[in-house]
Image (cartoon, grey):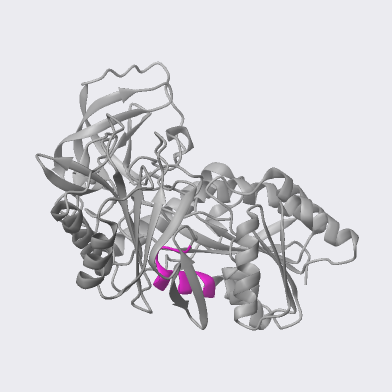
């Protein structure tokens, strides 16, 4: 099952905790194609002028000092800066901006007052139109670095952006803390364990901001114990809020260290009074000393176990731990790009690998002959079956397991797919699945990627038998360095 990306307080697709903690690929995997002069030695606190050539995969500026790669957070392509080295490693160095001598014409003032402390967004200082161009370039850089293909001749399309790139996130996971007797809720600062209080996050849906502030006030007024990360004592550790953007429904999840919640009835009544749109109040117990947000035990303490949300003509029930895309508006655009790339005529056999709760397969179902999906999480498969049944879609089959194990068994029984849709985590496709695709040889592979580097690496493997018709980047997370892409990959010599 594909996991959320990026999650401000939570994780990225491989389970990494927090966009503000996990910064995508390691530096050597970032996109640069310059030989390194190992004879040049840099030192911490060394300063030098630097021209920024491009953006790296984590949103930092990339420049070259005496042919050595230097990453500079906050710097933009075209800028001339004075850089001060903060870290020296064998293959690259990191630096901070000491002075901007020549700013980019695309540099803007960030909207968020805690932008530089938080680290949840990396590109608020870059005009949105230019963000879209840079994200297209990140995809191109990845292909240049990780493939031997003629990238200059490939159809890498302009990034699909948002008309209003603010307030798009339907879910927040804010850590709770206390300072001077005041309850705080927000994210840990970049590369630190300092809790940054966030009252109005610019990329969160306004309903989630409002709900978090209301719950924070209720906890303060009722004198509810707050978890202290250092001592391991205290009760409430995280406030999770999810809104159905199309339905307007709200779910509140309190993550606590113990099941006993003092003044539970008062908390519930105050939430209902101040937030009448709330239809689900849930408690999750996580008493472990861990950076994971959720524990194993979940209990609905008021209302439904779920909220309803709509994508196009499809409706979904979202429980506290159900994966669902964080930007529903762009999810529709992403899935429509998948449908366009699949180019179905009504007869094709389609595999939805890494199917999760079946969203992509169900999106394609009206144009497919049959949809078959698999996922390693049995609960996701059960949800996929329920979602298909709820929508009256009967030409589907969902089974638990790895695609590289399940698919050969189907082929052996005479069922061969025409199209395979893959939507893997940030680590990309399993090597076994890549080899299975090369053996089974479906006419098309539609690859939905959340990591341009692993997309490029997988394309290089598939290029033995396949060619890329085009890649369409989609901006699922404006003002961050993340970019999703849909690649249409077709069998060489196929119809």
- Asked if residue 432 lies left or right of residue 173, the reply is right
- Is residue 65 shown in magenta? no
- Asked if residue 49 lies left or right of residue 359, the reply is left
Residue nearest the observer in this picture, 93 or 398 = 398
The image position of residue 176, as x and y in percent, is 25, 46
**Is 179 placed above or below 399 here?**
above
Residue nearest the observer in this picture, 331 or 302 = 302
How many labels sit on residues?
0
- Is residue 331 shown in magenta? yes
Residue at 36% x, 47% y: name it: 19
The image position of residue 482, as x and y in percent, is 40, 53
Q: Quadrant for the C terminus, please.
A: bottom right
Residue at 36% x, 50% y: name it: 255
- Asked if residue 335 lies left or right of residue 388, the reply is left
Which residue appears farthest toward the left when viewing the image?
Answer: 180
What's drawn in magenta, residue-wise?
324-336
**In this rendering, does residue 355 appear at all?**
no
Residue nearest the observer in this picture, 465 or 375 = 375
Q: Quadrant of residue 239?
A: bottom left
Residue at 44% x, 54% y: name it: 5
- Asked if residue 447 lies left or right of residue 164, the reply is right
**In this rendering, does residue 275 appear at all?**
yes
**Is 326 placed above or below 363 here?**
above
- The secondary structure making up most of the magenta span is helix
Q: Quadrant for the N terminus, please.
A: bottom right
Which residue appears farthest toward the right when viewing the image?
Answer: 413
The image position of residue 121, as x and y in percent, is 29, 51
Residue nearest the observer in this picture, 91 or 177 = 177
The image position of residue 331, as x and y in percent, is 46, 69
């Amino acid at each position: 099952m594909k996991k959320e990306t990026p999650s401000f307080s939570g994780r990225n697709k491989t389970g990494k905790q927090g966009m503000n903690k996990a910064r995508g690929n390691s530096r050597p995997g970032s996109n640069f194609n310059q030989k390194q002069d190992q004879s040049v030695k840099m030192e911490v606190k060394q300063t030098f002028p630097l021209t920024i050539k491009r953006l790296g995969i984590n949103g930092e500026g990339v420049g070259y000092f005496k042919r050595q790669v230097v990453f500079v957070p906050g710097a933009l392509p075209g800028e001339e800066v004075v850089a001060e080295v903060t870290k020296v490693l064998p293959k690259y160095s990191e630096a901070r901006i000491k002075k901007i001598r020549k700013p980019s014409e695309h540099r803007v003032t960030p909207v968020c007052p805690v932008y530089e402390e938080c680290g949840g967004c990396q590109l608020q200082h870059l005009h949105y139109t230019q963000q879209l161009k840079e994200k297209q370039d990140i995809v191109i850089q990845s292909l240049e670095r990780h493939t031997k293909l003629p990238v200059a001749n490939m159809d890498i399309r302009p990034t699909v952006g948002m008309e209003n790139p603010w307030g798009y996130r339907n879910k927040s996971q804010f850590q709770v803390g206390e300072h001077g007797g005041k309850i705080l809720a927000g994210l840990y600062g970049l590369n630190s364990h300092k809790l940054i209080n966030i009252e109005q996050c610019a990329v969160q849906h306004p309903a989630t901001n409002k709900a978090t502030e209301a719950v924070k006030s209720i906890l303060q007024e009722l004198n509810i114990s707050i978890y202290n990360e250092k001592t391991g004592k205290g009760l409430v550790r995280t406030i999770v809020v999810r809104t159905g953007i199309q339905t307007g429904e709200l779910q509140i999840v309190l993550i606590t260290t113990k099941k006993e919640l003092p003044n539970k009835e008062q908390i519930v009544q105050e939430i209902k009074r101040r937030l009448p749109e709330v239809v689900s109040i849930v408690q999750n117990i996580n008493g472990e000393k861990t950076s994971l947000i959720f524990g194993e035990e979940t209990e609905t303490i008021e209302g439904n176990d779920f909220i309803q949300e709509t994508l196009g003509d499809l409706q979904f029930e979202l429980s506290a731990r159900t994966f669902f895309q964080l930007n529903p508006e762009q999810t529709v655009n992403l899935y429509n790009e998948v449908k366009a790339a699949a180019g179905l005529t009504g007869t094709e056999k389609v595999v939805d690998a890494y199917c999760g709760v079946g969203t992509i397969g169900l999106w394609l179902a009206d144009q497919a002959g049959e949809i078959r999906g698999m996922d390693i999480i049995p609960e996701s498969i059960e949800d996929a079956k329920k979602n298909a049944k709820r929508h009256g879609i009967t030409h589907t089959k969902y089974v638990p397991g790895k695609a590289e194990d399940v698919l050969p068994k189907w082929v052996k029984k005479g069922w061969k797919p025409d199209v395979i849709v893959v939507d893997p985590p940030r680590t990309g496709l399993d090597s076994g699945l890549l080899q299975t695709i090369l053996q089974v040889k479906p006419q098309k592979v539609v690859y939905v990627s959340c990591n341009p580097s692993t997309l490029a690496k997988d394309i290089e493997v598939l290029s033995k038998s396949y060619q890329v018709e085009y890649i369409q980047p989609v901006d699922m997370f404006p003002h961050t360095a993340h970019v999703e892409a849909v690649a249409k990959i077709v069998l060489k010599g196929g119809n």
